[in-house]
Image (spheres, rainbow, N blue to C red):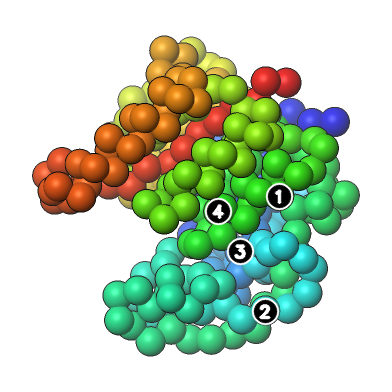
Amino acid sequence: MINNNLIYDFGFHNGDDTDFYLAKGFQVVAVEADPNLVKKGIERFSQQLQDGQLILLNKAVSDNDGIQNFYIHPIKKDWSSCFKEYAESDGSEAEVISVETICLATLYKLYGVPRYLKVDIEGCDLMVAQHVSQLPEKPLFISLETSKKDYAGLFAYLFVAGYVAYQLVNQGNNINRPAPGVNGEGKRIDYKFSQYSSGYFGNDLPPDKWLSYDEALTRYIKYKELKQIDNQELGLGWVDLHARHAG
């Protein structure tokens, strides 16, 4: 059964998304593999951690519970990944550490099924989408970062999982995005997103921008083609795929 007061934040990073969810009144389970980012998160959210509104796990989301390598980008911490090729895609040499891993099924058992699952873990979003499709209970809302490599799989797994409505949200626009006209999720608050924010989710997204599977996939392919033509002018930013479940 879904806990409508619970959000999972996969890819905590600097905590900006978690900060928004907490301000909206939700309980948050955040997962972050980089121990330095977790340390900063503990300092930033000490009160919420003490109150139990936030659980912050220093682990990597994986397909099993165990230990694996994690590659930390020397500058762009949001590029760090369980895959070396992602963390070193710009030619940098990543720091390699060992981290504990946890899978979605274990998180469900420990903390429950969230209303919303935000996923932004470099190179691993497809794996999470696959696991969501395989587990019997699904979050009502989910968002994942798209990529030209994995987009077809992301769409396919969400469709198989029973997600029936989709929105493509350009993260580059979130910093200037106005507040929604209705209060669809949690408390109504005045909030300014940062450049690292995933932005609104669920019923706070524009109701007239939900698309069918075919419409959203076609639109993403057109966006991808624009990026290939001119990434500087036509295909700016990066796109999150939001989805709403039939249930």
Q: Which mark is residue 68?
A: 2
Q: Relative to 210, is 23 on the left or the right? A: right
Q: CA distance from mark 1 to mark 3?
A: 18 Å
| Residue 183, position as x, y percentages in the image | 53, 17
Q: CA distance from mark 4 to mark 1?
A: 10 Å
Residue occupying image coordinates x 49% and y 62%: 122
**From this viewpoint, is residue 39 visible?**
no
Distance Cα–Cα, label 2 vs label 1: 18 Å
Q: Which residue is mark 4?
A: 125
Tell me where residue 32 sits by quadrant: bottom right
- The answer to whether residue 105 is left or right of residue 146 is right
Three-letter residue code for mark 4: Asp
Question: Residue 131, which numbered label?
Answer: 1
Is the Cβ of the residue at disc 4 closer than 8 Å to that at disc 2? Answer: no
Q: Residue drawn 43% across and 71% down?
A: 86
Nearer to us: label 4 or label 3: 4
Q: Which residue is mark 3?
A: 32
In the picture shown, does residue 94 fall above or below 76? below
Question: Quick one: label 2 or label 1, which is nearer the N terminus?
Answer: 2
Q: Amino acid at mark 2?
A: Gln
**Pointer 1 or 3: first along the chain:** 3
Callout 3 amino acid: Glu
